[in-house]
Amino acid sequence: MNFDFSDDQKELREQAQRFLRDRCTPKAVRNILEGGDTYDRTLWKGVVEMGWTATVIPEEFGGLGLGYLELCVIAEELGRVVAPIPFASSVYLATEAILLAGSAEQKAKYLPKLASGELVGTFAMAEGAGAATPRTVRTTLKSGKLDGTKVPVADGNVADFAIVLARTSDDGERSLTLAIVDLKGPGVTRKAVTTIDPTRDQAEIAFAGAPAEALGGAGDGWSLTRQIQDRAAVLVAFEQVGGASACLEMAKDYALNRYAFGRQIASFQAIKHKLADMYVNNEIARSNAYYGAWALSTGSAELPEAAAGARVSATQAYDYASKENIQTHGGMGFTWELDCQLYFRRARTDGLSLGPARAWKERLVQQLERKNAA
């Protein structure tokens, strides 16, 4: 089994690196961090023009009709530069939800505009701190009206519409359904939520009789949510791998150029161990991400297991690399002037973006138990 990318996909990677090297510098990321804007609009326009938002959307709906492997390549490069744009919310979640569960009419309505960047979507599941479960969903959908509050919602202040997990009755998991709601329509109130990473917008969205249309079958909400999360987990894992790789490169370069007591600090055993541990964790995460990419691109039944493994290992690797990058830089690593903070912030928000790590560890254990019992 060949888990490597093709020559065309490697060429796409090089193209993405060149584009982002020019368009998404640390200065551009800091402009969002320090300037108060919700995302880099110039970068977003460029990404749309490159066709990245249309990568997996079929050609009949204005997309490029490429595969998930190409999207994984793009995701890694976006993660490497901590791109401050609503790509994950709109492409990994909203687009995937409509591709998976949308009717012919809904696909024709939303996919072309998602492909062209005319619309930005997001996915609203959580209703507070902790892992979202069927029991924690209190938002209701009755007679085409949505009531409740979702928080945090990634890019909720940026998005034009949201896919919302809601319940239609009190009948447990079977009462959950997905709904599409216009975030600029009546009955919707949005409020910014302050987080550790201002380069990735978060919002609290309140619905008070907001008009909404069902997405997918009645009672399929939780099942569809799990499938959407599995797809997004693989793609976010590639972003995390990209970020962790950048942290290792930063730490290595600093260690080779910083001298103490007349020697490169890279020659000290403690620094060598840090860099070696970062490399090992990153390679484990990359291997699991590649497994997830294979399962996603082939529609394999192993996707839930592969997605959970990719999610857990990538979250751990990015968290570790972002912290050890700061430690390798020593006292300078904690200062505002250095860029270590950008990756530490993103590692934290990426680690919670699809639910906490403990929830994904539980999912991985459940998948392995089912596999072993079969």
Image: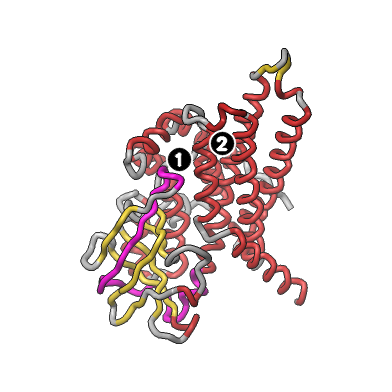
Residue drawn at (44%, 28%), measured in percent from left and top?
22
Q: Tell me which amino acid carries mark 2.
A: Glu
Question: Circle 2 is placed at which residue position?
Answer: 11
Of the two numbered discs 2 and 1 on the same chain, state the one appearing first in sequence: 2
Residue drawn at (53%, 61%), measured in percent from left and top?
355
Decide if residue 210 is in sight here. yes
Identify whether 47 is placed above or below 188: above
* Residue 170 located left or right of residue 110: right
Residue 215 painted magenta: yes
Q: Which mark is residue 83?
A: 1
Q: CA distance from mark 2 to mark 1?
A: 20 Å
Could you say which quadrant of the image residue 320 lies in?
top right
Label tally: 2
Residue 272 painted magenta: no
Residue 190 drawn at (x, y percent): 29, 58
Residue 288 drawn at (x, y percent): 68, 52
SS category of the residue bearing label 2: helix
Residue 313 drawn at (x, y percent): 66, 52
Residue drawn at (48%, 30%), measured in percent from left and top?
21
Q: Residue furthest top?
A: 262
Residue drawn at (36%, 74%), measured in percent from left and top?
214
Decide if residue 114 is in sight here. no
Q: Tell me which amino acid carries mark 1.
A: Ala
Identify whether 234 is placed above or below 267: below
Q: Residue furthest bottom?
A: 171
Q: Which residues are magenta?
A: 196-225
